Image (cartoon, rainbow, N blue to C red):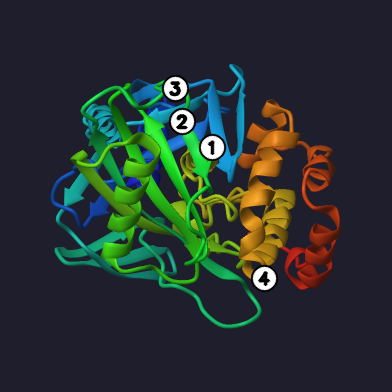
Amino acid sequence: MIAGAGCAGLSLAVQLALQARRRGQPCPRIVLVEPRTQYVRDRTWCYWRFVDHPFAEAVTRRWTRWLVREGAREVVRGTPAHPYEHVAVDAFYALARRILAEFPEVELRLGCEVRAIVERADGVEVETSAGTVRAALAFDSRPAAPATGGAEVDLLQHFVGWEVEAPRAVFDPETPVLMDFAVSQARGLHFLYVLPFSPTRALVETTYITEATLPAAAYEADLREYLAARYGVTEPAVQFVERGAIPMTTRPAVPRTSARVVHLGLRGGLAKGSTGYAFQAIQAHTTALATELLDRPGAPPRVPPARPAPAEAMDRVLLSHLHRHPERGPQIFVDLFERLPADLLCRFLSDEARLLDYPRVMLASPLLEMTGAVLRSRALWMRTREAR
């Protein structure tokens, strides 16, 4: 049983079904419970490609170079080895449902809310708005309640994006702007993100990394000011609006509630703490988890780590430093893009870094400041990982 049929829940179901077919095994009985009544475009997923996944058909755009900006400094980097790919979320939902429709063992219950998951001696009972579901295992991808307290760093990456159609060609369709820090930093660490789909159409997002969200009017003012100042677009035709808030925390991932209740997606710690990227990590995690489930059907699974331990430690150091000195953020991020080889940069930002990559990342940062951050945050980065 899967609670929540978003990116992580659908990905696990698809992986289980397709892997079972390739092995010649019967597909496990899967019930997905999802509170929404229909799927619509509601977000944007991008990543640097490192792993294959079943949703390649939903990739609508890829770029082999990208730009970051701080003040008057612009850095353009790129690599054909790891293109930056955009997944159309509506195409993802449609493709996942089309694949799962081929398997009668899979049931998707829309408009149904999970209210409680209780482990029993021989399985789980899931209380939903439409009755009780009994299963051998439960996978929970529902949003988790925010954690508070302690010495942890808890920031939010919060944003509002407009997909706009400009009256003339103003965007460079070959070069997304991943971080433009040449904007006001008065409210905290702030950048604009521009994902160009054509010379006249782009997704433009105003993004903050702070402790709390802002009033809706603040994001709208940011977008209007940026479009006018950077592109001369004073009356954008807004085709689509997205908004969200991704936790950026030093808290350790919680992979499971109990032996038979496993966490997925953001609830399971799959978002990279320092950037918020999650789609590719979800694909790798659900692939490994599906393999484990098919190898040992019915048994409480051994849950693969959400993220590599060195990457978690590095993110804790960086988040600790940004929490103390948000004004240093623009320089730190742009320095990484400027000083690191593009392939290494992509590995680091995608949690695919090799062990010897991490010292090079540290050397590309303000060394004395980051050394101080390491020492101050040693209780975070030295702690042992929770048992899986």
Q: Give the amino acid type for the residue marked by disc 4 in the picture.
A: Arg
Say which residue appears at 35% left-offset and 56% top-offset: 244
Give me the disc on residue 284. Answer: 1
| Contact between labelled residues 1 and 4, with CB atoms less than 8 Å apart | no
Q: Quadrant of the C terminus?
A: bottom right
Q: Give the amino acid type for the residue marked by disc 1 in the picture.
A: Ala
**What residue is shown with label 3?**
62
Q: Give the amino acid type for the residue marked by disc 2 in the picture.
A: Pro
Label 1 or label 3, whichever comes before in sequence order: 3
Query: Where is residue 378 shown, x and y percent of the image?
Result: 80, 69
Determine the secondary structure under disc 4. Answer: helix
Query: Where is residue 344 shown, x and y percent of the image?
Result: 72, 31
- How many numbered marks are there? 4
Q: Give the amino acid type for the residue marked by disc 3 in the picture.
A: Arg
Give me the disc on residue 176. Answer: 2
Mark 1 to mark 3: distance in Å? Answer: 20 Å
